[in-house]
Image (cartoon, rainbow, N blue to C red):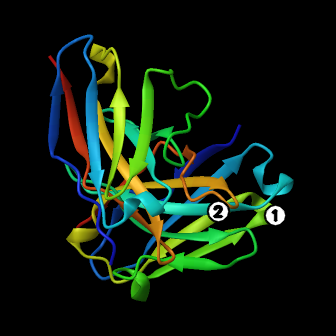
Amino acid sequence: QVQLQESGPGLVKPSQTLSLTCTVSGDSFSSGSYYWSWIRQPAGKGLEWIGRIYTSGRTNYNPSLKSRVTISVDTSKNQFSLKLSSVTAADTAVYYCATAPGGRTSLDYWGQGTLVTVSS
Amino acid sequence: SYELTQPLSVSVALGQTARITCGGNNIGSKSVHWYQQKPGQAPVLVIYSDGNRPSGIPERISGSNSGNTATLTISGAQAGDEADFYCQVWDSNTVVFGGGTKLTVL
């Protein structure tokens, strides 16, 4: 069973960079290939996929966010990370990390989510 | 970009069958996944690859996919089934979510 936990600042100032980390427990990092995704959800709204990274480091990003997003993975720490630059109030949301075994296009396991507010 | 269309809300009487649709151009050629999200909680995968249930998901939850519509069916609806439901596909190297459907059990 895979467990994920998001961490990072809950408050970010406009124009700054949002940085979050997802720590993974279980044997997923060492046992095979997984896709590691970030998803966000503004209050009262639907889910928006941000992007994902494969264990090998290959990435896919949402075209609408691609210019501001970087996702990276650190297998030695069982972590993967999200950086979103030049944030505005529109980036205020609950941010989730999620994963699925390589070859699957679903999101099988999710973290509990972390609220990030963009405000001065 | 690919779009998925879901009804904003669906209501079902207690014990009856609820059907939540997810429309998309030739969606039957894609693999559709469904998530249930209760208030204040993270989404949970309830159906993957059109009609497969992850471990722990009851048999009364099922899925189908054909033509331009995928359908999530919840039989014998219970009060605990009230939630938002999202469909999802993979298209052009991106994850695409439907807008979500709020299921109300009357």
Picture coordinates of residue B85, whole percent (x, y): 32, 40
Q: Secondary structure at mark 1?
A: helix
Residue that numbered label 1 is attached to? A76
- The one nearer the camera, A111 or B24, is B24
Q: Is residue B104 left or right of residue A22?
A: left
Query: Neighbour class for label 1 at 10 Å: few (<14), some, many (≥20)?
Result: few
* Residue B37 percent coordinates (x, y): 36, 37
Q: Secondary structure at mark 2?
A: strand
Most foreground residue, A21 or A2 = A2
Q: Given the image, on which type of amino acid does mark 2 rest?
A: Tyr
Q: Position of residue A60 (x, y in %)?
A: 54, 77
Please report, as a chain letter, where disc 1 is located.
A
Q: Residue furthest bottom?
A: A67
Using the image, name the chain to which the residue with label 2 belongs.
A
Residue at 17% over, 34% down: B10
- Which quarter of the rendered picture does the C terminus of chain B lie within? top left
Q: Quadrant of the N terminus of chain B?
A: bottom left
B92 to the left or right of A26: left
Relative to A39, does residue B51 appear above or below in the rendering? above
| Dot in front, 2 or 1 | 2
> Residue beneath label 2, please?
A35
Q: How many marks?
A: 2
Q: Label 1 is placed on what type of residue?
A: Ser
For this view, does B31 lie left or right of residue A54?
Answer: left
Looking at the image, is B80 positioned above or below residue A69? Answer: above
The residue positioned 68% from the left and 42% from the top of the image is A2
Residue plotted at (32% across, 36% down): B40
Q: CA distance from mark 2 to mark 1?
A: 16 Å
Image height of B23 relative to A68, above or below: above
Circles 2 and 1: CB distance less than 8 Å?
Answer: no
User: Looking at the image, is mark 2 or mark 1 earlier in the sequence?
Assistant: 2
